[in-house]
Image (cartoon, rainbow, N blue to C red):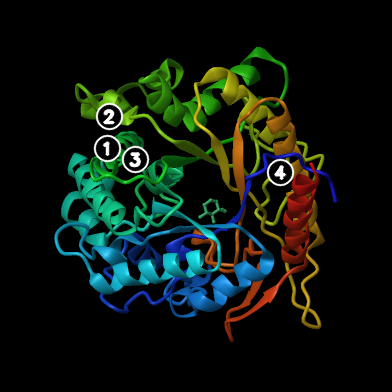
Amino acid sequence: MSTFRFKEDFVWGVATSSYQIEGAAREDGRGESIWDTFCRVPGKVVKGESGDVACDHYHRFEEDLDLMAQMGVNAYRFSIAWPRVQPDGRGAYNEKGLAFYERLVDGLLKRGIQPFATLYHWDLPQALQTEQSGWESRDTAYRFADYAGKIGRVLGDRVASIATHNEPWCTAWLGNATGYFAPGNADLKKAAHVAHHLLLSHGLAVQAMRADGVKAPLGIVLNQSPAHGATEAPEDVAAASLEYAKFVRWYMDPIFKGEYPAEALQWYGANGPQEVIRDGDFDIIGTPLDFLGINYYTRIFASASGDKRPPGVHGFTDMDWEVYPEGLTELLTNLNGEYKLPPIYITENGCAAKDALENGRVQDTDRINFLDLHLAALSEAAQQGVDVAGYFAWSMLDNFEWASGYDKRFGMVYVDYETQKRTLKDSAHWYSEVIAEHAAAEAAR
Ligand code: IFM
């Protein structure tokens, strides 16, 4: 096990999201989400699977919190299903849905685990999609701010932080440019409009929660990667720069610099966001934040010829994503030089592996290696001056991996979906040791 150097009050967590684990899709007044609808479209999700039952966490959350306590984590990042607490995305709130998240947060606090809430991890109320084309509509940003204010009032005094969005690039790009995710649109201009409204909704939500007196730190979670050209040839270097502008800077620049990157705007051309940008939007989007969450999985590898297969010196995960830990150090140190950043959390990092339960044990050595390499890379970034406040492994549990269904296992806890039995994998035991060792090293310092 490597030795990692982090600050004394470093946050060691695990993460999940509502649609991927909760199940109970039609219980206690939960409304439909765009993922419920999308999963029913033939061919969209492997084997036609859905989050209807998932890990049945809605009914088993006490057991899951006990497992977290057993692992020794001091934080848990979860998301709130908007349609569970406000079934139509506007109007009446669902008391039973709100009560579930209150029980969850209280259960965490009782066990000494800090609750890190995310307001939107892709499960938009279907009613907003049906009635006003979801995030294509500016009004959805205002509906989101109302919902954020409500959550702030109900949970804001008990959670350790609230993030507005998880990975808005996925919502905008995978949901609207490629159609790979819900709601399944394949239209570049729609994607640009959606991205702008997501950013706007983020700023409006932060303002709404602050106006309601929420004291918990507020932020956003972005998925990010450094981008490398396949060769040193100028056209490959330019391809990498463009991919970085579309993936990372498209979200970072509006939030921290008040503008979209010119390079990407030029690429979008007439399909860009210009028609939906209004005076004052960038002031709202740039509302100061208390933290930035970064989800890191791999790097972007770009070439002018379109060949995107990297060399993969550390191998590839079961998602066929290159294992590239040094990219995390590079990404964070570059961001630190480029922007005036609040404290950073790695809000997701992990890998899918072909895990098998044999004699009651899951020997997920690949995952342990992956996490070890990435924690070392994060520790290196901290040594180089990046203000790293915490790390959340993705994921606490095996779960519904969106369009890939249940075949891809990201969890530190194995889930037998037939019986819903949970088994701590070797990586969970390893993570406990890392956390305990860090605490002991800090105590000795
Ligand atoms: O499972 C997802 C999660 O919902 C968002 N970030 C990436 C993970 C792995 O694909």
Q: Give the image quarter of residue 394.
A: bottom right
In whole angstroms, how far apart are the C-alphas of marks 1 and 3?
Answer: 30 Å
Q: Give the image quarter of residue 192.
A: top left
Q: Earlier in the sequence, mark 1 or mark 4?
A: 1
In whole angstroms, how far apart are the C-alphas of marks 1 and 4?
Answer: 38 Å
User: Tag 1: residue type?
Assistant: Gln
Position of residue 39 measured from the top left corner of the image (x, y, whole percent): 40, 66
In this picture, is 218 found above or below 261? below
In the shown orientation, is residue 50 left or right of residue 349? left
Of all residues, the one furthest to the right in this rendering is 1
Of all residues, the one furthest to the front in this rendering is 444
Mark 4 element type: loop
Q: Which residue is mark 3?
A: 187
In the shown orientation, is residue 107 left or right of residue 351? left
Which mark, residue 322? 4
Q: Which residue is mark 2?
A: 284
From the viewer's side, name the closer residue of 367 and 41: 367
In whole angstroms, how far apart are the C-alphas of marks 3 and 2?
Answer: 26 Å
Position of residue 404 measured from the top left corner of the image (x, y, whole percent): 55, 61
Mark 3 element type: loop
- Tell me the residue at 45%/28% (across/down): 252
State whether residue 208 appears in this view: yes
Dot 2, how many residues are within 10 Å of its Cα: few (below 14), some (14-19), or many (20+)? many
Task: Point out the frontmost of discs 3 and 2.
Answer: 2
In the shown orientation, is residue 164 left or right of residue 283? right
Of all residues, the one furthest to the left in this rendering is 91
User: Tag 2: residue type?
Assistant: Ile
Task: Point out the frontmost of discs 3 and 4.
Answer: 4
- Tell me the residue at 31%/46% (across/down): 214
Task: Point out the frontmost of discs 4 and 2.
Answer: 2
In whole angstroms, how far apart are the C-alphas of marks 3 and 4?
Answer: 28 Å
Mark 2 element type: helix
